Amino acid sequence: MKKKMLALALAAAMMLSLAACGGSKTDAPADTSTDAPADADTSADATVYKVGICQLVQHEALDAATQGFIDALNEALPGQVDIENNNASGDATNCATIVNGYVSEGVDLIMANATAALTAAASATADIPILGTSITAYGVALDIEDFNGTVGGNISGTSDLADLSKQADMITEWFPDAKKVGLLFCSAEPNSRYQIEEVATCLANKGIETQEFAFTDTNDVASVTQSAADYSDVVYIPTDNTAASNTEAIANILVPAGVPAICGEEGICSGCGVATLSISYYDLGVTTGKMAAKILTGEADISTMPIEYTDATPKYNPTICESLGITPLDGYTAIEG
């Protein structure tokens, strides 16, 4: 009887000891953004990784990148990711608050969606792996001179940059008689300035005059767009988060004025543009998610991972083309919806 009681006491003690043990990872998946796959590994000894997402603002392109990231990460590590997804509502200060919270929580990886999110994460930690997505130029975003394609340290990611010289060529292909091109962008976004400066150089080499029209935030989008419409034969809008969040306001001025826009990405073009050379932001997010899985499992070292890109596709907006009486060029795919 004493032996039986001793055995029971030892078993209870072992159970208490196991319950008290823990590590830096959680013991069960709790993906806050999407349901775990049906074939998820929920065994007690499965490692679960904590991943924090900071997205600058809600709009179609960034939303698609975030969803692609989540889907790819869940597919690569079914049942092994606990994802926390937060949106900064377009405020860089909120980005800092979000990523600092992730650092305090001791997450295993931070995904920073858009430049302000990336710079906030880079300032918050030099130890936790950071993957950027929807970043146009990492050298510009992180103030790296002579950027060679690999950030190093604890940062890597994916870029949404489509060939800027080809975008400049699109302007002259669609509108060969254009003499003045207005460059419409947000002055608070350094990657937007990088794009418009590159496009301006390409257009200057073609003998086309350009002028910058920079809004500071949502409040002056309409007035600045009106100034651009008054000046321009054609407007160029780069991949710009503020523009992407205000396409209706931009279209409400450009379309009645009869001024077409060539855009840096499909989401902006679908709202206010005629044509674009655009990537799939969902595919960009998928690529980022696959990179994250390799980092989390130790398959890859983030310090040696180069920035990755995805292919761009020429597309046109049939609705605005019809409104402006423009015949789409061959080789362009219609934007659906």
Image (tube, helix red, strand yellow):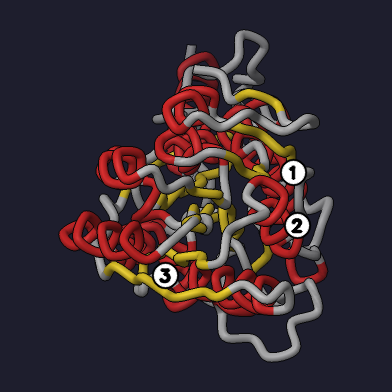
Contact flag, marks 2 and 1 (Cβ < 8 Å): yes
Residue for badge 3: 189
* Comparing labels 3 and 2, the label whose residue is closer to the camera: 2
- Of mark 3 and mark 2, the one earlier in the sequence is 2
Q: Secondary structure at mark 2?
A: helix
Of the numbered discs in the image, which one, if any, rests on residue 166? 2
**Is 290 on the left-hand or right-hand side of 185?**
right
| Image x and y of residue 68, in percent | 60, 33
Q: Could you tell me how far apart the alpha carbons at marks 3 and 1 are, in whole angstroms? A: 22 Å
- Of mark 2 and mark 1, the one earlier in the sequence is 2
The one nearer the camera, 49 or 14, is 49
Q: Is residue 170 above or below residue 155?
A: above
Outermost residue on the left side: it is: 219
Identity, as a three-letter code, of the amino acid under mark 1: Ala
> Where on the picture, by quarter, is residue 219?
bottom left
Outermost residue on the bottom side: it is: 145
**Is 287 on the left-hand or right-hand side of 179?**
right
Q: Is residue 268 above or below residue 208?
A: above
Q: Could you tell me how far apart the alpha carbons at marks 2 and 1 are, in whole angstroms? A: 11 Å
- Residue under the point 34% across and 71% down: 214
**Is 31 on the left-hand or right-hand side of 132?**
left
Identity, as a three-letter code, of the amino acid under mark 2: Lys
For mark 3, does the 10 Å Cα neighbourhood hold few (<14), some (14 to 19), or many (20 or more) residues?
some
Residue for badge 1: 312
- Residue under the point 56% across and 79% down: 142
Identity, as a three-letter code, of the amino acid under mark 3: Glu
| Image x and y of residue 165, in percent | 74, 64
Q: Is residue 225 above or below residue 204?
A: above
